[in-house]
Structures are given as C-alpha cells and as structure tokens.
Amino acid sequence: AQKHNHKQTCLKKTSRKIERLSPDDQDKLCRFLYPQPVVESTTIDEDGKIELKRTNPFMVPYVPAITGRFGCNTDGKFIGSGAFGMALSIYVASYTAKNSLDSAIMTSALLASLKSIGDPRLVDEGKCRLFMNKTLNNASARRELSAQQVAASLLGKPSHYTDAKFIHCYW
C-alpha cells in the first residue's frame, strides 16, 4: 500500500501553507480525510460500500496494475450498487465532466460592470480593454481541467466536433 503524506494539495481551498500548520491542524484540514480510521478486516456494508482492511491510518488503497501503468498515484475504488455505488457514480461522472467558466458569460458580466461605473467617455478605453483581457486570461488560466481534457490537449485532439464554420473576430 501507499502511505499518505500531507502536502500542499491537501489544502486546495485555502491559502495556508501546510508546513506552517501543526500535525493536528494538518489532519483536520486534509481534504483527502487522512488519517482514516483503522479497520480490522475488510467488510461490505448494506449500502455496498467496501471498507478495506487498514492497519495504518495513513494507508492509501491502490491497484498496483493501474499505478504501474499510469505511473502516478491512484486510489482505486469499487463502484458497486446501492446508495454508496450511486453516490460514487455521480461523483465520478461529475468529476470527469467538469464545467468550466463560460467566457461569454464572463464577458457580458464584465461589460455590465464597466457600464455601471458611469459615463463611458470618462473611462479610458485602452485600460478597459486591458482590464477585460487580463480578467478573461486569468479566469481561463485558473479554471480546473479534468484528466480527460488534459490528455486530449496533449494528444492534439479537439474538445468537440462540429460542422459549423467559425471566423476569428479581433476586437
């Protein structure tokens, strides 16, 4: 088995630095919920959840064949039936099909904000355009990508297929 060590990725939703936290605080804030309770023997509950034997609270379950093939950390879970299987299926489906922020919505929101600041003749057009470009680029750079999106990009595959024709519009 692999052993979980708290790293900065445990604190995805905060700007706090992991090395500045006490071990107790690291345990409380870990988004992967480590340490896990020790489990004396492998069991399957009435909802279909499989609880693997765990003698160490930081032991991470993994599938050696998958880990060896992909050369990265994995956490293999059986998706059975019952309430747990349904919940895990929904999680996996939503994780692999992450929605990203729609640039058109962001642009219209920014335009509305700029219009609300007052008389457009008093606003420097160059600064506004720079502000909008920086904001859109920043939002695009910070969006989360699924493993499938990254793989498709690295392989040069399109994100979608369509017979529609598009032209570049430089504003």
Image (cartoon, helix red, strand yellow):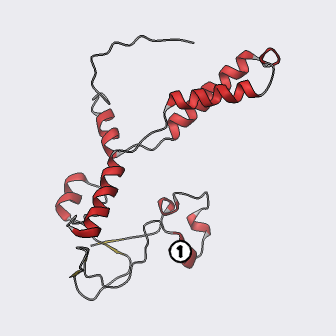
Q: Note whether 40 is above or below 66 in the view shown.
A: below
Q: Going by the picture, which residue comes out furthest to the bottom?
A: 40
Q: Could you say where residue 170 lies in the image, as x and y percent from the top left?
A: 53, 11
Quadrant location, the C terminus = top right
Residue in view at x 44 percent, y 71 percent: 33
* Residue on which the image places disc 1: 28
Quadrant location, the N terminus = bottom left
Q: Could you say where residue 121 lies in the image, as x and y percent from the top left?
A: 80, 14
Q: Is residue 21 left or right of residue 117?
A: left
Q: Is residue 166 left or right of residue 28?
A: left
When asked about the image quadrant of residue 14, the answer is bottom right
Q: Could you say where residue 13 lies in the image, as x and y percent from the top left?
A: 55, 57
Q: Is residue 116 left or right of residue 39?
A: right
Residue in view at x 34 percent, y 82 percent: 56
Q: Is residue 147 left or right of residue 69?
A: right
Which amino acid type is shown beneath numbered disc 1? Lys
Q: Note whether 126 is above or below 74 in the view shown.
A: above
User: Please, what secondary structure does the residue beneath circle 1 have?
Assistant: helix
Q: Residues within 10 Å of mark 1 (few under 14, many from 20)?
A: few
Q: Could you say where residue 126 lies in the image, as x and y percent from the top left?
A: 71, 16
